[in-house]
Amino acid sequence: MKRYKIKDTKSIHSNCGVFGIYNHPQAAIMAYYGLHALQHRGQESAGIVTSEYLPDKKRYHFNVHKDFGLTLNIFNAKILTEILKGNSAIAHNRYSTAGASDRRTNIQPFKVVYKDGNIALSHNGNLTNANSLRLKLQQEGTIFQTTCDSEIFLHLIAKSQEKNIIDKLKEVFSIIRGSYSLCILTDDSVIAARDPFGVRPLSFGKLGNSYVFASETSSFDIIEAEYIREVEPGEIIQIDKEVVETGKEKSYKFANEKSYKHCIFEYIYFSRPDSIIFNEKVDKVRRKIGKNLAVEKPPPKQEKEDKRIIVINVPDSSNTATIGYVSEVSKNRKDVKHEIGLIRSHYVGRTFIQPGQDIREIRLKTKFSIIKGVLEGRKVIIVDDSIVRGNTLKLLVKLIRKAKPKEIHLRITSPPIISPCFYGMDFPSKEELIAYRHKGNVEEIRKELDVDSLEYLSIDKLLESVPFSTKKTGYCTACFTCEYPIPIDDIEDVNKEKFED
Ligand code: SF4
Protein backbone atom coordinates (compact mmCIF):
# COMPACT_ATOMS: atom_id res chain seq x y z
CA MET A 1 0.00 0.00 0.00
CA LYS A 2 1.37 3.38 -0.94
CA ARG A 3 1.55 5.58 2.13
CA TYR A 4 1.61 9.34 2.53
CA LYS A 5 4.65 11.01 3.93
CA ILE A 6 3.69 14.01 6.01
CA LYS A 7 4.93 16.47 3.41
CA ASP A 8 2.91 14.84 0.65
CA THR A 9 -0.30 15.29 2.54
CA LYS A 10 0.07 19.04 2.70
CA SER A 11 -1.93 19.66 -0.48
CA ILE A 12 -4.93 17.83 0.92
CA HIS A 13 -4.67 19.30 4.39
CA SER A 14 -6.74 22.36 4.88
CA ASN A 15 -8.73 24.01 7.56
CA CYS A 16 -11.97 25.35 6.27
CA GLY A 17 -15.29 26.94 7.05
CA VAL A 18 -18.61 25.31 6.17
CA PHE A 19 -22.10 26.76 6.05
CA GLY A 20 -25.58 25.44 5.21
CA ILE A 21 -29.06 26.96 5.09
CA TYR A 22 -32.49 25.49 4.40
CA ASN A 23 -35.70 27.26 3.46
CA HIS A 24 -34.65 30.84 2.88
CA PRO A 25 -35.74 32.92 -0.15
CA GLN A 26 -32.26 34.45 -0.29
CA ALA A 27 -30.28 31.35 0.59
CA ALA A 28 -27.26 32.32 -1.52
CA ILE A 29 -27.03 35.80 0.01
CA MET A 30 -27.23 34.31 3.51
CA ALA A 31 -24.51 31.82 2.54
CA TYR A 32 -22.37 34.67 1.23
CA TYR A 33 -22.58 36.53 4.54
CA GLY A 34 -22.05 33.27 6.41
CA LEU A 35 -18.85 32.68 4.47
CA HIS A 36 -17.77 36.24 5.03
CA ALA A 37 -17.90 35.66 8.79
CA LEU A 38 -15.84 32.48 8.33
CA GLN A 39 -13.21 34.09 6.11
CA HIS A 40 -10.54 33.62 8.79
CA ARG A 41 -10.93 29.84 8.38
CA GLY A 42 -9.95 29.89 4.72
CA GLN A 43 -8.77 32.49 2.26
CA GLU A 44 -7.71 30.42 -0.69
CA SER A 45 -11.06 29.73 -2.34
CA ALA A 46 -14.78 29.73 -1.71
CA GLY A 47 -17.95 28.36 -3.23
CA ILE A 48 -21.73 28.21 -2.88
CA VAL A 49 -24.12 25.57 -4.24
CA THR A 50 -27.89 26.13 -4.19
CA SER A 51 -30.81 23.79 -4.77
CA GLU A 52 -33.49 25.25 -7.03
CA TYR A 53 -36.81 23.60 -7.81
CA LEU A 54 -37.80 23.87 -11.49
CA PRO A 55 -41.62 23.54 -11.48
CA ASP A 56 -41.95 23.19 -15.27
CA LYS A 57 -39.49 20.27 -15.28
CA LYS A 58 -40.67 18.96 -11.90
CA ARG A 59 -37.13 18.43 -10.70
CA TYR A 60 -34.39 20.11 -8.72
CA HIS A 61 -31.38 21.78 -10.26
CA PHE A 62 -28.14 22.61 -8.41
CA ASN A 63 -26.52 25.96 -9.18
CA VAL A 64 -22.87 26.45 -8.36
CA HIS A 65 -20.34 29.23 -8.28
CA LYS A 66 -16.85 28.87 -6.86
CA ASP A 67 -13.43 30.33 -7.44
CA PHE A 68 -10.06 31.13 -5.93
CA GLY A 69 -9.84 34.17 -3.70
CA LEU A 70 -11.74 35.89 -0.95
CA THR A 71 -15.50 35.64 -0.59
CA LEU A 72 -16.05 39.31 -1.36
CA ASN A 73 -14.10 39.02 -4.63
CA ILE A 74 -15.75 35.81 -5.82
CA PHE A 75 -19.42 36.74 -5.53
CA ASN A 76 -21.42 39.74 -6.69
CA ALA A 77 -25.10 40.67 -6.71
CA LYS A 78 -25.69 39.17 -10.15
CA ILE A 79 -24.12 35.83 -9.23
CA LEU A 80 -25.98 35.65 -5.93
CA THR A 81 -29.40 36.57 -7.30
CA GLU A 82 -29.42 35.42 -10.91
CA ILE A 83 -27.19 32.33 -10.87
CA LEU A 84 -27.41 30.99 -7.33
CA LYS A 85 -31.19 30.69 -7.21
CA GLY A 86 -32.94 28.40 -4.78
CA ASN A 87 -34.13 28.21 -1.19
CA SER A 88 -31.34 26.01 0.17
CA ALA A 89 -27.59 26.34 -0.03
CA ILE A 90 -24.33 25.04 1.29
CA ALA A 91 -21.04 26.91 1.16
CA HIS A 92 -17.38 26.44 1.87
CA ASN A 93 -14.17 28.37 2.15
CA ARG A 94 -10.76 26.85 2.16
CA TYR A 95 -7.36 27.55 3.59
CA SER A 96 -4.02 26.94 2.01
CA THR A 97 -0.53 28.15 2.88
CA ALA A 98 0.80 31.15 0.96
CA GLY A 99 2.19 30.21 -2.42
CA ALA A 100 0.48 26.84 -2.63
CA SER A 101 -0.99 26.30 -6.06
CA ASP A 102 -4.02 24.13 -5.66
CA ARG A 103 -6.22 22.77 -8.38
CA ARG A 104 -9.45 24.46 -9.35
CA THR A 105 -11.23 21.11 -9.09
CA ASN A 106 -10.37 21.01 -5.36
CA ILE A 107 -12.56 24.03 -4.63
CA GLN A 108 -15.58 23.04 -2.56
CA PRO A 109 -18.50 22.48 -2.28
CA PHE A 110 -18.26 19.39 -4.49
CA LYS A 111 -21.40 18.72 -6.49
CA VAL A 112 -22.36 15.52 -8.33
CA VAL A 113 -25.41 13.80 -9.74
CA TYR A 114 -25.92 10.18 -8.69
CA LYS A 115 -28.70 7.65 -8.86
CA ASP A 116 -30.79 9.37 -6.18
CA GLY A 117 -30.45 12.92 -7.53
CA ASN A 118 -28.14 15.85 -6.93
CA ILE A 119 -25.84 15.99 -3.95
CA ALA A 120 -23.25 18.55 -2.84
CA LEU A 121 -20.84 18.49 0.09
CA SER A 122 -18.70 20.90 2.15
CA HIS A 123 -16.11 19.39 4.48
CA ASN A 124 -13.99 20.83 7.28
CA GLY A 125 -11.48 18.36 8.65
CA ASN A 126 -9.16 15.68 7.43
CA LEU A 127 -9.57 11.96 6.88
CA THR A 128 -6.90 9.73 8.36
CA ASN A 129 -7.63 6.67 6.22
CA ALA A 130 -8.13 8.59 2.97
CA ASN A 131 -5.17 7.02 1.22
CA SER A 132 -6.27 3.42 1.64
CA LEU A 133 -9.91 4.26 0.85
CA ARG A 134 -8.91 6.14 -2.25
CA LEU A 135 -6.72 3.28 -3.43
CA LYS A 136 -9.49 0.76 -2.83
CA LEU A 137 -12.04 2.89 -4.68
CA GLN A 138 -9.65 3.39 -7.60
CA GLN A 139 -9.04 -0.35 -7.80
CA GLU A 140 -12.80 -0.80 -8.02
CA GLY A 141 -12.92 1.60 -10.96
CA THR A 142 -13.77 4.93 -9.32
CA ILE A 143 -12.43 7.93 -11.19
CA PHE A 144 -11.41 10.79 -8.90
CA GLN A 145 -11.76 14.35 -10.12
CA THR A 146 -9.89 16.02 -7.27
CA THR A 147 -6.90 15.35 -5.04
CA CYS A 148 -8.97 16.20 -1.98
CA ASP A 149 -9.93 13.60 0.64
CA SER A 150 -13.45 15.08 0.85
CA GLU A 151 -14.35 13.55 -2.53
CA ILE A 152 -14.27 10.10 -0.92
CA PHE A 153 -17.52 10.88 0.94
CA LEU A 154 -19.37 11.34 -2.34
CA HIS A 155 -18.08 8.13 -3.93
CA LEU A 156 -18.96 6.10 -0.86
CA ILE A 157 -22.45 7.68 -0.71
CA ALA A 158 -22.99 6.90 -4.40
CA LYS A 159 -21.85 3.28 -3.95
CA SER A 160 -23.96 2.58 -0.88
CA GLN A 161 -26.89 0.23 -1.43
CA GLU A 162 -28.82 1.61 1.54
CA LYS A 163 -32.27 2.95 0.77
CA ASN A 164 -32.15 6.52 2.10
CA ILE A 165 -29.49 9.20 2.53
CA ILE A 166 -29.32 8.87 6.33
CA ASP A 167 -28.61 5.13 6.18
CA LYS A 168 -26.12 5.74 3.39
CA LEU A 169 -24.32 8.29 5.54
CA LYS A 170 -24.29 5.98 8.55
CA GLU A 171 -22.65 3.34 6.38
CA VAL A 172 -20.11 5.83 5.03
CA PHE A 173 -19.23 7.09 8.52
CA SER A 174 -18.61 3.52 9.66
CA ILE A 175 -15.89 3.26 6.99
CA ILE A 176 -14.33 6.70 7.20
CA ARG A 177 -11.92 7.77 9.96
CA GLY A 178 -10.66 11.20 10.87
CA SER A 179 -12.19 14.58 11.49
CA TYR A 180 -15.19 15.89 9.63
CA SER A 181 -17.75 18.62 10.08
CA LEU A 182 -19.98 18.38 7.03
CA CYS A 183 -22.76 20.31 5.34
CA ILE A 184 -24.54 18.28 2.67
CA LEU A 185 -27.14 19.52 0.21
CA THR A 186 -29.58 17.04 -1.33
CA ASP A 187 -32.42 17.94 -3.68
CA ASP A 188 -34.84 18.55 -0.84
CA SER A 189 -32.85 18.75 2.39
CA VAL A 190 -29.77 20.13 4.11
CA ILE A 191 -27.84 17.72 6.30
CA ALA A 192 -25.08 18.40 8.82
CA ALA A 193 -22.86 15.78 10.42
CA ARG A 194 -19.89 15.68 12.74
CA ASP A 195 -17.31 12.98 13.37
CA PRO A 196 -17.63 10.84 16.52
CA PHE A 197 -14.91 12.81 18.35
CA GLY A 198 -16.21 16.28 17.40
CA VAL A 199 -12.74 17.48 16.44
CA ARG A 200 -13.91 20.51 14.46
CA PRO A 201 -16.81 22.71 15.58
CA LEU A 202 -20.23 22.78 13.89
CA SER A 203 -23.17 24.84 15.10
CA PHE A 204 -26.89 24.62 14.47
CA GLY A 205 -29.19 27.64 14.42
CA LYS A 206 -32.50 29.08 13.29
CA LEU A 207 -33.45 32.18 11.34
CA GLY A 208 -37.22 32.67 11.27
CA ASN A 209 -38.50 29.61 9.40
CA SER A 210 -35.04 28.79 8.07
CA TYR A 211 -32.43 26.51 9.59
CA VAL A 212 -28.69 27.14 9.45
CA PHE A 213 -25.44 25.33 10.13
CA ALA A 214 -21.98 26.87 10.35
CA SER A 215 -18.48 26.10 11.52
CA GLU A 216 -18.71 29.01 13.93
CA THR A 217 -21.52 31.12 15.34
CA SER A 218 -19.89 34.26 13.91
CA SER A 219 -21.84 33.25 10.76
CA PHE A 220 -25.11 33.29 12.69
CA ASP A 221 -24.51 36.74 14.15
CA ILE A 222 -24.00 38.39 10.79
CA ILE A 223 -27.34 37.09 9.45
CA GLU A 224 -29.03 37.45 12.86
CA ALA A 225 -29.71 33.73 13.21
CA GLU A 226 -30.30 32.32 16.66
CA TYR A 227 -27.84 29.73 18.00
CA ILE A 228 -29.66 26.57 19.04
CA ARG A 229 -26.90 24.11 19.88
CA GLU A 230 -23.90 22.26 18.54
CA VAL A 231 -24.28 19.40 16.12
CA GLU A 232 -23.23 16.67 18.54
CA PRO A 233 -20.18 14.55 17.78
CA GLY A 234 -21.43 11.40 16.05
CA GLU A 235 -24.72 13.08 15.08
CA ILE A 236 -26.46 13.68 11.75
CA ILE A 237 -29.10 16.44 11.61
CA GLN A 238 -31.39 16.57 8.62
CA ILE A 239 -33.58 19.57 7.80
CA ASP A 240 -36.38 19.18 5.26
CA LYS A 241 -39.94 20.38 4.60
CA GLU A 242 -41.32 18.25 7.43
CA VAL A 243 -38.89 19.82 9.92
CA VAL A 244 -40.01 23.31 8.89
CA GLU A 245 -43.63 22.25 9.48
CA THR A 246 -43.07 20.52 12.83
CA GLY A 247 -40.27 22.75 14.14
CA LYS A 248 -38.33 19.67 15.29
CA GLU A 249 -35.05 18.75 13.63
CA LYS A 250 -34.42 15.14 12.58
CA SER A 251 -31.48 13.87 14.59
CA TYR A 252 -29.70 10.54 14.12
CA LYS A 253 -26.82 9.27 16.23
CA PHE A 254 -24.28 7.10 14.44
CA ALA A 255 -21.56 6.87 17.09
CA ASN A 256 -21.30 7.17 20.82
CA GLU A 257 -17.70 7.77 21.89
CA LYS A 258 -17.04 7.88 25.64
CA SER A 259 -14.93 11.02 25.34
CA TYR A 260 -14.86 13.72 22.68
CA LYS A 261 -11.62 15.15 21.31
CA HIS A 262 -12.24 18.75 20.36
CA CYS A 263 -9.30 20.54 18.77
CA ILE A 264 -7.88 22.65 21.57
CA PHE A 265 -6.17 24.85 19.00
CA GLU A 266 -9.57 26.22 17.98
CA TYR A 267 -9.66 27.98 21.36
CA ILE A 268 -6.01 29.04 21.23
CA TYR A 269 -5.98 30.56 17.80
CA PHE A 270 -8.27 29.41 15.07
CA SER A 271 -11.84 30.35 15.95
CA ARG A 272 -13.01 33.94 16.13
CA PRO A 273 -13.29 35.38 19.66
CA ASP A 274 -16.93 36.34 19.05
CA SER A 275 -17.90 32.72 18.28
CA ILE A 276 -19.27 30.00 20.52
CA ILE A 277 -17.63 26.63 19.92
CA PHE A 278 -17.69 23.40 21.91
CA ASN A 279 -20.43 24.97 24.09
CA GLU A 280 -18.39 27.97 25.23
CA LYS A 281 -17.55 31.53 24.14
CA VAL A 282 -14.11 31.64 22.54
CA ASP A 283 -13.46 35.09 23.98
CA LYS A 284 -14.01 33.83 27.53
CA VAL A 285 -11.72 30.83 27.08
CA ARG A 286 -9.00 32.81 25.34
CA ARG A 287 -8.95 35.38 28.15
CA LYS A 288 -8.64 32.58 30.65
CA ILE A 289 -5.73 31.13 28.68
CA GLY A 290 -4.05 34.55 28.88
CA LYS A 291 -4.74 34.77 32.62
CA ASN A 292 -3.31 31.34 33.27
CA LEU A 293 -0.23 32.24 31.27
CA ALA A 294 0.22 35.26 33.53
CA VAL A 295 -0.11 33.08 36.64
CA GLU A 296 2.35 30.54 35.32
CA LYS A 297 4.75 32.70 33.32
CA PRO A 298 4.58 36.32 34.58
CA PRO A 299 6.62 39.20 33.15
CA PRO A 300 10.17 39.69 34.45
CA LYS A 301 10.76 41.96 37.44
CA GLN A 302 10.95 45.69 37.06
CA GLU A 303 14.38 47.05 37.96
CA LYS A 304 14.72 50.38 39.77
CA GLU A 305 15.77 52.21 36.63
CA ASP A 306 13.02 50.64 34.45
CA LYS A 307 10.02 52.51 33.16
CA ARG A 308 6.74 50.56 33.30
CA ILE A 309 6.92 47.23 31.48
CA ILE A 310 4.93 47.17 28.25
CA VAL A 311 2.83 44.16 27.19
CA ILE A 312 1.93 44.13 23.51
CA ASN A 313 -0.35 41.87 21.53
CA VAL A 314 0.37 40.52 18.06
CA PRO A 315 -2.72 41.70 16.23
CA ASP A 316 -5.23 40.21 15.76
CA SER A 317 -4.68 36.66 16.91
CA SER A 318 -3.36 37.38 20.40
CA ASN A 319 -5.53 40.42 21.24
CA THR A 320 -7.93 38.63 23.55
CA ALA A 321 -5.34 36.50 25.35
CA THR A 322 -3.22 39.60 25.95
CA ILE A 323 -6.13 41.33 27.68
CA GLY A 324 -6.44 38.28 29.94
CA TYR A 325 -2.68 38.24 30.58
CA VAL A 326 -2.50 41.90 31.53
CA SER A 327 -5.66 41.86 33.66
CA GLU A 328 -4.22 38.99 35.72
CA VAL A 329 -0.78 40.57 36.10
CA SER A 330 -2.31 43.92 37.03
CA LYS A 331 -4.03 42.37 40.06
CA ASN A 332 -0.73 42.39 41.95
CA ARG A 333 1.59 44.62 40.00
CA LYS A 334 1.49 48.27 39.03
CA ASP A 335 4.66 48.15 36.95
CA VAL A 336 3.04 46.51 33.89
CA LYS A 337 0.66 47.97 31.34
CA HIS A 338 -0.92 46.96 28.05
CA GLU A 339 0.04 49.03 25.02
CA ILE A 340 -0.53 48.90 21.31
CA GLY A 341 3.00 48.55 19.98
CA LEU A 342 2.22 46.84 16.71
CA ILE A 343 -0.15 47.96 14.00
CA ARG A 344 -1.42 45.43 11.52
CA SER A 345 -2.35 46.33 7.97
CA HIS A 346 -5.28 44.42 6.53
CA TYR A 347 -4.44 45.48 3.01
CA VAL A 348 -1.47 43.23 2.27
CA GLY A 349 -1.26 42.50 -1.42
CA ARG A 350 1.59 41.71 -3.75
CA THR A 351 5.13 42.43 -2.67
CA PHE A 352 7.98 43.46 -4.96
CA ILE A 353 11.57 42.86 -3.95
CA GLN A 354 14.92 44.23 -4.93
CA PRO A 355 17.85 41.84 -5.41
CA GLY A 356 19.25 40.86 -2.00
CA GLN A 357 16.05 41.67 -0.12
CA ASP A 358 14.28 39.02 1.93
CA ILE A 359 10.75 38.51 0.58
CA ARG A 360 9.51 37.33 4.00
CA GLU A 361 10.85 40.47 5.65
CA ILE A 362 9.17 42.71 3.08
CA ARG A 363 5.92 40.79 3.53
CA LEU A 364 6.11 41.15 7.29
CA LYS A 365 6.76 44.87 7.00
CA THR A 366 3.72 45.29 4.78
CA LYS A 367 1.69 43.49 7.43
CA PHE A 368 3.08 44.93 10.69
CA SER A 369 4.51 48.25 11.68
CA ILE A 370 5.88 49.30 15.05
CA ILE A 371 5.06 52.30 17.21
CA LYS A 372 8.57 53.34 18.22
CA GLY A 373 7.55 55.76 20.96
CA VAL A 374 5.74 52.99 22.82
CA LEU A 375 8.59 50.49 22.69
CA GLU A 376 11.77 52.55 22.95
CA GLY A 377 13.81 51.95 26.11
CA ARG A 378 11.18 49.61 27.60
CA LYS A 379 11.10 46.03 28.67
CA VAL A 380 8.58 44.67 26.17
CA ILE A 381 6.50 41.52 26.65
CA ILE A 382 5.08 40.11 23.41
CA VAL A 383 2.10 37.81 23.95
CA ASP A 384 1.54 35.48 21.01
CA ASP A 385 -0.68 32.43 20.55
CA SER A 386 1.80 29.89 19.19
CA ILE A 387 5.12 29.39 17.44
CA VAL A 388 5.06 27.14 14.39
CA ARG A 389 8.19 27.56 12.28
CA GLY A 390 9.31 30.66 14.16
CA ASN A 391 10.17 32.55 10.96
CA THR A 392 7.54 35.27 11.34
CA LEU A 393 8.30 35.76 15.00
CA LYS A 394 12.02 36.05 14.28
CA LEU A 395 11.34 38.80 11.77
CA LEU A 396 8.89 40.48 14.12
CA VAL A 397 11.50 40.55 16.90
CA LYS A 398 14.01 42.01 14.43
CA LEU A 399 11.47 44.70 13.51
CA ILE A 400 10.70 45.50 17.16
CA ARG A 401 14.43 45.76 17.96
CA LYS A 402 14.56 48.70 15.51
CA ALA A 403 12.56 50.63 18.12
CA LYS A 404 15.43 50.06 20.59
CA PRO A 405 13.51 48.41 23.45
CA LYS A 406 15.53 47.58 26.55
CA GLU A 407 14.57 43.90 26.43
CA ILE A 408 12.13 41.67 24.53
CA HIS A 409 10.32 38.84 26.34
CA LEU A 410 8.05 36.35 24.62
CA ARG A 411 5.06 34.74 26.32
CA ILE A 412 3.20 32.08 24.32
CA THR A 413 -0.37 31.03 25.10
CA SER A 414 0.20 27.41 24.06
CA PRO A 415 2.84 24.73 24.68
CA PRO A 416 5.59 24.11 22.08
CA ILE A 417 4.22 22.60 18.86
CA ILE A 418 6.27 19.46 18.33
CA SER A 419 4.16 17.47 15.90
CA PRO A 420 1.93 18.12 12.89
CA CYS A 421 -1.84 18.01 12.84
CA PHE A 422 -3.56 15.22 10.91
CA TYR A 423 -7.07 16.40 11.71
CA GLY A 424 -7.42 19.43 9.50
CA MET A 425 -5.02 22.13 10.66
CA ASP A 426 -2.46 22.90 8.01
CA PHE A 427 0.81 22.74 9.94
CA PRO A 428 4.12 22.23 8.16
CA SER A 429 6.09 18.99 8.44
CA LYS A 430 7.63 18.26 11.83
CA GLU A 431 11.13 19.05 10.55
CA GLU A 432 9.98 22.62 9.93
CA LEU A 433 8.55 23.09 13.43
CA ILE A 434 10.96 25.15 15.51
CA ALA A 435 10.18 23.22 18.72
CA TYR A 436 10.76 19.91 16.98
CA ARG A 437 14.04 21.10 15.47
CA HIS A 438 15.29 22.03 18.94
CA LYS A 439 13.89 18.85 20.54
CA GLY A 440 11.63 20.97 22.74
CA ASN A 441 14.59 22.83 24.28
CA VAL A 442 13.10 26.24 25.12
CA GLU A 443 16.48 27.88 25.74
CA GLU A 444 17.64 26.96 22.24
CA ILE A 445 14.40 28.25 20.73
CA ARG A 446 14.88 31.49 22.69
CA LYS A 447 18.35 31.91 21.23
CA GLU A 448 17.12 31.30 17.70
CA LEU A 449 14.34 33.86 18.14
CA ASP A 450 16.82 36.32 19.67
CA VAL A 451 14.69 37.30 22.66
CA ASP A 452 15.68 37.92 26.27
CA SER A 453 13.26 35.35 27.64
CA LEU A 454 10.77 32.86 26.22
CA GLU A 455 8.05 31.08 28.14
CA TYR A 456 5.27 28.79 26.93
CA LEU A 457 2.00 27.91 28.67
CA SER A 458 2.17 24.35 30.03
CA ILE A 459 -0.21 21.69 28.78
CA ASP A 460 -1.68 21.36 32.30
CA LYS A 461 -2.48 25.06 32.52
CA LEU A 462 -3.89 24.99 29.00
CA LEU A 463 -6.23 22.17 29.95
CA GLU A 464 -7.16 24.10 33.09
CA SER A 465 -8.24 27.01 30.87
CA VAL A 466 -10.71 25.17 28.62
CA PRO A 467 -14.25 24.19 29.59
CA PHE A 468 -15.34 20.65 30.39
CA SER A 469 -19.02 21.43 30.03
CA THR A 470 -20.26 17.86 29.64
CA LYS A 471 -19.15 14.49 30.98
CA LYS A 472 -17.88 13.66 27.53
CA THR A 473 -15.93 16.85 26.85
CA GLY A 474 -12.30 16.17 26.08
CA TYR A 475 -9.63 17.64 23.84
CA CYS A 476 -7.11 16.70 21.21
CA THR A 477 -3.70 18.07 22.18
CA ALA A 478 -1.67 15.97 19.75
CA CYS A 479 0.40 18.78 18.22
CA PHE A 480 1.77 19.48 21.71
CA THR A 481 1.92 15.93 23.06
CA CYS A 482 2.16 13.56 20.05
CA GLU A 483 -0.78 11.66 21.51
CA TYR A 484 -3.09 11.25 18.54
CA PRO A 485 -6.59 10.30 19.69
CA ILE A 486 -7.81 9.09 16.29
CA PRO A 487 -5.75 6.41 14.53
CA ILE A 488 -3.74 7.71 11.60
CA ASP A 489 -3.74 4.74 9.28
CA ASP A 490 -2.15 6.18 6.20
CA ILE A 491 0.72 8.22 7.52
CA GLU A 492 3.88 6.37 8.35
CA ASP A 493 5.89 9.24 9.67
CA VAL A 494 4.01 10.12 12.85
CA ASN A 495 6.42 11.53 15.36
CA LYS A 496 6.35 9.45 18.51
CA GLU A 497 9.11 11.31 20.30
CA LYS A 498 8.39 13.47 23.27
CA PHE A 499 10.48 16.32 24.48
CA GLU A 500 11.01 17.97 27.80
CA ASP A 501 9.32 21.37 27.97
S1 SF4 B 1 -3.26 18.05 16.48
FE1 SF4 B 1 -3.41 20.14 17.35
S2 SF4 B 1 -4.32 21.37 15.72
FE2 SF4 B 1 -4.70 19.21 15.22
S3 SF4 B 1 -6.71 18.72 16.05
FE3 SF4 B 1 -5.20 18.16 17.59
S4 SF4 B 1 -5.00 20.01 18.88
FE4 SF4 B 1 -6.00 20.62 16.99
Image (cartoon, helix red, strand yellow):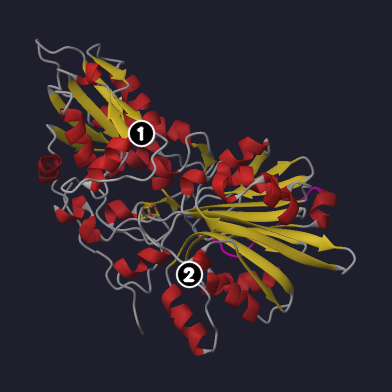
Residue 343, percent from left and from top: 34, 27
Residue 302, percent from left and from top: 14, 16
Judge the density around disc 1: few (<14), some (14-19), many (≥20) Cα neighbours within 10 Å. Answer: many
Element at label 1: loop
- Residue appearing at x 54%, y 39% in the figure: 276
Disc 1/disc 2 C-alpha distance (Å): 32 Å
Residue identifier under label 1: 318
Of the residues shown, which amino acid type is indicated by label 1?
Ser
- Residue appearing at x 33%, y 36% in the figure: 367
- Residue appearing at x 20%, y 24% in the figure: 380
* Left or right: 125 in relation to 446: right
Asked if residue 250 is among those painted magenta in the image, a careful observer would answer yes
* Left or right: 448 in relation to 20: left
Residue 265, percent from left and from top: 39, 46
Q: Nearer the viewer, residue 166 or 144?
A: 144
Residue 488 visible in the current orientation: yes
Look at the image and give the residue range highlighted in magenta: 247-257
* Above or below, comparing residue 447 to residue 323 in the picture: below
Q: Of the numbered discs in the image, which one, if any, rests on residue 149?
A: 2
Element at label 2: loop
Asked if residue 380 is among those painted magenta in the image, a careful observer would answer no
